[in-house]
Image (cartoon, rainbow, N blue to C red):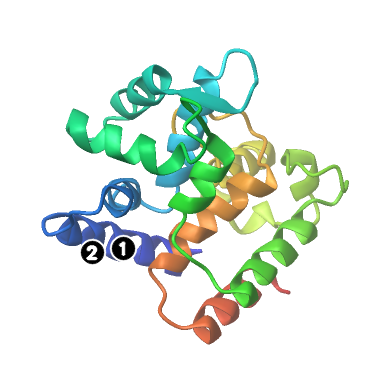
Amino acid sequence: MSGTARHDREMALESKKKLCSCTDPIEKLRLQCLSRGSAGIKGLGRVFRIMDDDNSRTLDLKEFMKGLNDYGVLMDKDEALQLFAQFDKDKSGLIDFDEFLVTLRPPMSNARKEIIAQAFRKLDRTGDGIVTVEDLRGVYNAKHHPKYQNGEWTEDQVFRVFLDNFDSPYDKDGKVTPEEFTNYYAGVSASIDTDVYFITMMRNAWKL
């Protein structure tokens, strides 16, 4: 997936550049996440999920502000309040963070969403909706990895590092959900202009 790593670096630099002139709070937050690479939006999602103590999948203003702060998002209080208000459509004082993350993802065509879903289904061999090390056996060949070849890593370690690509940098649990997988590839997608190129890259990467 070295092509992905290159796109990641290019996108991070591009996002940092765009940040200088950006005024829209949603776009500003999106760019700050993308400037950390493809996993940036997913990482913010994980921070919010950890804060959601009662599993309500909603956040109040205090939790929202703390989440932005914990993730190191640079945004003044007025902008954060404006951002919260844009998501608190029913003025309940709460925002649905699934909806928040979906809005924060860079827009993707249906063709891109479908190829991402296909790749996830291929990886999820057990069909339980979560990709783990067990699912990777037989789908991803660890034996070509240089660290496996020189004896530094076991096969399981190679698999775990591979899953870490899609996992949050702050809470690596070795399990990847469809949401995390899509959030990761939404980041990759933001760096690729055409559907054809994105779909070709996905087909080659996952042998679809």
Say if 143 sits above or below 91 in the image: below
Say if 18 sits above or below 147 in the image: below
Q: Which residue is mark 2?
A: 14
User: What is the C-alpha distance between the residues marked 1 and 2?
Assistant: 5 Å
Frontmost residue, 62 versus 29? 62
Amino acid, disc 2 = Glu
| x and y percentages locating residue 162 in the rendered image | 58, 47
Q: Which residue is mark 1?
A: 11
Residue located farthest toward the left when viewing the structure as drawn: 20
Res. 46 in view: yes
Residue 177 quadrant: top right
Query: In the drawing, does residue 115 fall left or right of residue 14?
Result: right
Mark 2 lies on a secondary structure that is: helix
Amino acid, disc 1 = Met
Frontmost residue, 80 versus 177? 80
Tag 2: Cα neighbours inside 10 Å, few (<14), some, or many (≥20)?
Answer: some
| x and y percentages locating residue 86 in the rendered image | 39, 43
Tell me what residue is drawn at x 46 percent, y 36 percent.
Answer: 88
Tell me what residue is drawn at x 58 percent, y 40 percent.
Answer: 98
Query: In the drawing, does residue 80 fall left or right of residue 123?
Result: left
Tell me what residue is drawn at x 54 percent, y 86 percent.
Answer: 196
Residue located farthest toward the bottom when viewing the structure as drawn: 196
Q: How many marks?
A: 2
| x and y percentages locating residue 79 in the rendered image | 22, 38
Q: Are marks 1 and 2 in contact (CB under 8 Å)?
A: yes
Residue located farthest toward the front when viewing the structure as drawn: 91
